[in-house]
Image (spheres, rainbow, N blue to C red):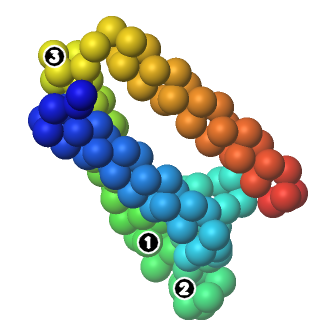
Amino acid sequence: MMTTMKFKVIFSALMMSAVMFVSQANAQTDGPKHPHKGKGEGFSPKKQTEWMKTELSLSDDQTAKVETINQKYSDRRKAMHQEHRKQMKALRDDQEKEFKSVLSKEQIAKLEAKKAERKEKRKQHHKECKGTNK
């Protein structure tokens, strides 16, 4: 019989997975928020500047200054994103250690198999979405 603690841990893991799945699904269906999102170019400072130049009728002087600003903040976003990824990995590693202290070897193996299955489904979904955006 499963103890209350084990149930809570497994239930929490399943809920987190569900939230992540729904969040990812919503993010993929909302469509581009910016003229350059979703076109394989990301939020490049150069493309953003070109868009602003066209849409806002920037002068050459303004364009040069705006491009410098866009590059500065792009670099800062990249650094923040990399740091966030490191923090999330550490968080997942800590969670996994705690799971291993609670779950049996069979349950851990099943959890890992489920994670691999979800990862493969996401990978396949990503390929399908990429194919429809061409």
Q: Residues within 10 Å of mark 2 (few under 14, many from 20)?
A: some
Q: Which residue is mark 3?
A: 101
Contact check, label 3 and label 1, Cβ < 8 Å: no
Local secondary structure at mark 1: helix
Q: Mark 3 vs mark 1: give the one in front.
A: 3
Three-letter code, disc 2: Leu
Residue at figure coordinates x 23%, y 30% from the top left: 2
Q: Is residue 113 above or below residue 64?
A: above
Q: The C terminus is located in which quarter?
A: bottom right
Q: Residues within 10 Å of mark 1 (few under 14, many from 20)?
A: many
Residue at figure coordinates x 36%, y 17% from the top left: 108
Residue at figure coordinates x 14%, y 39% from the top left: 4
Q: Earlier in the sequence, mark 2 or mark 3?
A: 2
Q: Earlier in the sequence, mark 3 or mark 1?
A: 1
Local secondary structure at mark 3: helix
Q: Is 58 on the left-hand or right-hand side of 17?
A: right
Residue 13, position as x, y percentages in the image: 31, 41
Local secondary structure at mark 2: loop
Contact check, label 1 and label 2, Cβ < 8 Å: yes
Q: Is 39 on the left-hand or right-hand side of 90?
A: right
In this rendered view, identify the residue nearer to me: 64 or 72.
Answer: 72
Q: Which residue is mark 2?
A: 58
Q: Which residue is mark 1?
A: 66
Q: Is 86 on the left-hand or right-hand side of 47?
A: left
Q: Is residue 21 above or below residue 28?
A: above
Q: Residues within 10 Å of mark 3 (few under 14, many from 20)?
A: few
